[in-house]
Image (cartoon, grey):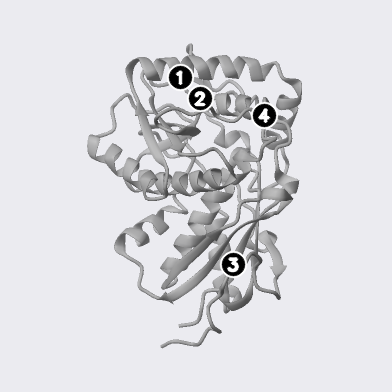
Amino acid sequence: MPYPTATDLGVRRLLCAAGQAPSVHNTQPWRFRVAREGAVELLADPARRLVRSDPRGRSLHVSCGAALFNLRLAVRVAGYQTFTRPLPAEGGSRLLAVVRPGPAAAPTPAELELYAGIGRRRTNREPYEDRPLPPAVVADLRVAASREGAALVPLGGYAATELLDLVAAAEDELAADHAYQAELRTWTTRESHHDGMPARVLGPRPAGDLPPTRDFGAHAAGSRARFEPRPRLMVLTTRGDRPADWLRAGQALQRVLLVACAHGVSVSFLNQPLDLRDMRLRGDPGHRRGHAQMILRLGYGPAVPRAPRRPPAELMAGVRENPPARGFRLLPPARARG
């Protein structure tokens, strides 16, 4: 069996899967490069970085981490083990990770189920049903995060109410930041068919107080709805708050989202406090449960359309003739396997 990067079709399948990952404002800030012996490099696309709201590059790394998980999963489904070398973008480097296929190995049923969810997963900003997640589902989601070196912390009662207050306060402050709003409009009023967030995916405007959503300023005219009174909130955390941790958070996030999809659970994000923290160039002080990287709202929502995606050909950064830097050892030359 040839490596998945041995043919144009194989490369296209990998990039199609990786490119369907969620990203901040659907910026899709990634590119990929085929290296020697079947390896694929994940690179940040600096032209798609949010200068105002993401000066540290945290959201970019989380987004690229989600694409990295999809890439790893696609290699597994192609019939190979994977070896991943994360290379945090320190010192201005765009190279975030290298994924190479290992020995042939059939994917597990669980991996096939996750892979099937890549195309079905959506960010759902509609109101959710007012019913709790079963404990078994919550447990599966937490295990999914832990498998990627992160933690998923459910919030309830006072903690959830306090977080919603914090989200609302951050939303008000961001609404008064003209540079932030201008950057947001760039990605919500685009004519492009391949990126950004058209009005159809933004959900309705909330009709009540402390809405469990965010105002992108470009919702469909006249669309208002009441959201669930008790949103189910969880926070994705990592032990550290550096580029390697952000990349890890993105991989954990995507595994969580695909497990949620398999359970029929909808997810949206309430990251306004994290945007505000990044804009102030402050690292997360952390607490005993780790550093907050993503704020998730979960529940059972209606079917929603998907956001647009860049075609695989646009994601390619070219073919790399030399092996990846930093002493990364590649496999011997690939041989056809029966």
State which tag comes first along the sequence, 4 or 1: 1
State which tag comes first along the sequence, 3 or 2: 3
Give the numbered dot on residue 40. 3
Residue 256 lies, in percent from the top left, at 40, 44
Instruction: Relative to 259, say whether 209 is above or below.
Output: above
Viewer-proximal residue among 203 and 258: 258
Q: CA distance from mark 2 to mark 4?
A: 24 Å
Dot 3 falls on a residue whose secondary structure is: strand
Q: Which residue is mark 2?
A: 213
Q: CA distance from mark 3 to mark 1?
A: 39 Å
The quadrant of the image that shows the N terminus is bottom left
Dot 4 falls on a residue whose secondary structure is: loop
Q: Which residue is mark 4?
A: 281
State which tag comes first along the sequence, 3 or 1: 3
Q: Which residue is mark 1?
A: 163
Residue 253 lies, in percent from the top left, at 46, 44
Q: Amino acid at mark 1?
A: Leu
Q: Are marks 1 and 2 in contact (CB under 8 Å)?
A: no
Q: Amino acid at mark 2?
A: Thr
Dot 2 falls on a residue whose secondary structure is: loop
State which tag comes first along the sequence, 4 or 3: 3
